[in-house]
Amino acid sequence: MKKFVLSTAALSFALVSLQAQATQFTVDVQNLTQGIYFTPLLVAAHNADTHLFKAGMKASDALQAMAEGGALTGLEADLDTASGQYSANPAGGLLAPGQSATTTSIDTGTSNNQYLSVVAMMLPTNDGFIGLDSYPIPTTPGTYTININGYDAGTEANDEIINGGGTPGVAGIPVAPGGDNGTGATGAANADTNTHVHIHRGVLGDTNATGGMSDLDSRIHRWLNPVARVTITVK
Amino acid sequence: MIRLNMQKTPYRIGLPLLMMATMLTACHHDDKENSENRTFSITVTNLTANQPLSPLTAIAHTSGYHAFVDGEAASVALELIAEGGDNGALLTEAKAASQHLDSKSGTAPIGPGASDTIELSVTHGSKAHISLLSMLVNTNDAFTASNAYSVSDLAVHESRTINLSVWDAGTEANSEAAGTIPGPADQGEGYNATRNDIVNFVGIHRGVISADDGLATSVLDESHRFLNPAAKVTIKRID
């Protein structure tokens, strides 16, 4: 199947002169974890100068709001300013462990929106998020799969205390959507040493439902990368 | 029937195009390169600190066969591998699948740092995918795998190296408790039909905790922890 697709593209290329072609594609995002929920996904096509986040750089205010509380409005405004195209919340809410959601078709037309980025907050974490930064959108029809990792926005201490705190700058974790958390934790970590966006070191958790360092359960809420799979289907 | 037709059509169209491309460019392709009869040498290296891998399960197949699907419940055959390292049922099912080309089992576990090599010979090389599975035996139900990796475009003598992650079969609670882990860390139970994990579907493993990292009832120690990747695989097309 793949060979046929590639051959046809090669033939088209040979017979028709080079011309800018619109790319039409859908993006499927699957949660590969067994105990972490994703807040509403933001799937964006944008130009080369736009980034929702950059590993090794400070998080923008908009990224911080997404990573600490799942809010997308700031990032959407940034994309609007850059004439980007995006699908916000294709899952219609939280993306539960094991589940996947697919965007409606995105058509980049004659724009320069040739790069794909995906973000969503990981719950329950303080400021962890799944991230794909500026993957070149393929133009050859086919299916492309990318496994992606969990990042730490570097904006909030990973105290692992569930207290409803989801506003930027407010300590704590908004919620454990699975309802499987403990309470009464004293706090697992102080402020981040690395205040730039970096690969998340994972959570600690503990097995103490009414105290201990963490409100997370070490038997449920830990994860290893990759945390999500992005599948791009180019028509 | 429909599947067979769908596979045939692109092949018929694809081959003339391929031949045309060959004539236009190099003209030195020999028959061997395009032969559908191909042999792959598959070497798996255990990259973990202290997780022996159960004897390999190696399957060559065309597209459409999956030993497991992320987010879906594990088959009993997969559960047998993930909980006890027993690949008999999965190999039997694979051989019965219409997509099956060749399959073999490794003869012994692969210790940390060690490797094992298996050769698979196929008759539809331009459609070949490789699936590999092996249990991390000092766990409740963790396995490492290559899930239908395409080797259809490998040239003769070409090799490719990939890293494998660890999945949790979602079939047994990760209690790490005495008597529940078949590997040398515990020598406990392997397969048990009861499904009591936090979910009943396959996902990327969240790692083991161990007694040293706060799970008091764990028989594992810090040396049994792992991160991805857990194994390195080199697939070489030898003819």
Image: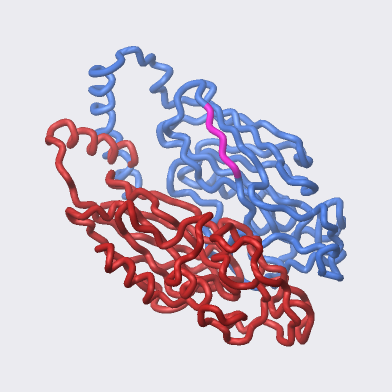
Chain colours: A red, B blue
Q: Position of residue B104 (x, y in %)?
A: 63, 37
Q: Is residue B183 above or below residue A96?
A: above
**Residue at the image point whose x is 53% and y is 75% from the top:** A68
Q: Is residue B102 above or below residue B165?
A: above
Is B219 left or right of B107, judged from the image as shown?
right
Q: Is residue A214 a member of the stretch shown in magenta?
A: no
Q: How many marks?
A: 0
**Residue at the image point whose x is 68% and y is 75% from the top:** A159
Q: Is residue B75 above or below residue B198?
A: above
Is B166 left or right of A129, judged from the image as shown?
right
Please identify the dominant SS of the magenta region: strand
Q: Position of residue A57 (x, y in %)?
A: 50, 57
Q: Is residue B160 a member of the stretch shown in magenta?
A: yes
Is A204 left or right of A49, judged from the image as shown?
right
Q: Position of residue B35 (x, y in %)?
A: 41, 22
**Residue at the image point whose x is 28% and y is 41% from the top:** A5
Q: Nearer the viewer, residue A125 or B165?
A: A125
Is A110 left or right of B145, judged from the image as shown?
left
**Residue at the image point whose x is 40% and y is 74% from the top:** A72
The residue most toward the left is A16
Q: Nearer the viewer, residue B28 or A134?
A: A134
For the record, the magenta segment spans: B159-163
Q: Is residue B80 visible?
A: yes
Q: Nearer the viewer, residue A59 or B171?
A: A59
Q: Position of residue A99 (x, y in %)?
A: 48, 69
Rendering quarter of residue B174: bottom right
Q: Is residue B73 visible?
A: no
